[in-house]
Image (tube, rainbow, N blue to C red):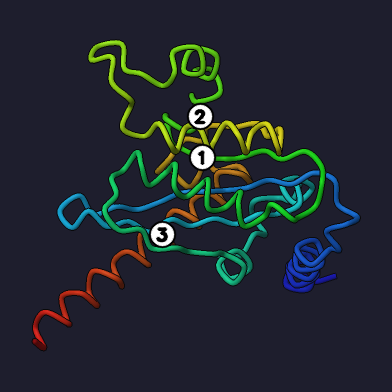
Amino acid sequence: MPARGKIENAYRSIAQEFDVVKALTKDFALFIDGSVSPVHKLGVGAYIMVPASFLETSSGVIGRDKITERLKVQRFEGTSSTRLELQTVLWALTENRQGPQGSLTIYSDSQCVSGLLKRKPRLLAGGFLSKKTNRQLGNASLYRTFYELHDEFGFHVVKVAGHSNSRFHDTAQRIFSFVDKEARKALKIWINELEEERRNR
């Protein structure tokens, strides 16, 4: 079979994997990322959920269009870099609350998100208070919701290297890079829309 035919068959196989009946799929992977404008305090979160078996596909045959057409984005106002990552993962999990039951692995480049499970015993025991000020942590409500959803889903979190050289991307990193680029693109569109509105006032 010609090389082109093999690639086309690979793409068809990927499409079928994406469209598999969720009830028959036990394990899923959730990729999340966000892009924020500190000046405007605006951010865009993005995510995609795929069957975990999809990660076994060779990264060389993953087309960006196959990812972006199933990607979801959400705009957040009055946010920051850390807060946006938390808001994005909570939004993604909440949207999939009635989804398939099985194992779930979250892929994120956020130090905060990837480290929250390790901090869970201390934060719960300390009532989400800051050690320095003894006041409620700024993102306490988001932390609480994160832990509630963890109790519900029982997910694992894997930290991926953000903005790494594409030559060394494995399948997970390649998917994550697509999510990252789409979040940045969506934020740029939003900022441009706002600037256009100001010019037309």
Residue 66 in picture, x, y percent from top left: 63, 68
Residue 25 in picture, x, y percent from top left: 86, 52
| Residue type, mark 1 in image | Ser
Give the farthest residue toward the bottom.
200
Q: In this figure, which residue is indicated by the disc labeled 2?
A: 114
Q: In which quadrant is the N terminus drawn?
A: bottom right
| Residue type, mark 2 in image | Ser
| Residue type, mark 3 in image | Ala
Q: Nearest the camera: 59 or 189?
A: 189
**What residue sits 81% from the left and 42% below the top?**
102
Q: In this figure, which residue is indicated by the disc labeled 1?
A: 108
Relative placement, left or right, of 34 versus 25 is left
State which tag comes first along the sequence, 3 or 1: 1
Relative placement, left or right, of 108 versus 172 is left
* Inter-mark Cα distance, 3 to 1: 13 Å
Relative to 14, residue 156 above or below:
above
Relative to 110, residue 46 above or below:
below
State which tag comes first along the sequence, 1 or 2: 1
Relative placement, left or right, of 168 versus 110 is right
State which tag comes first along the sequence, 3 or 2: 2
SS at circle 2:
helix
> What is the number of the mark on residue 183?
3
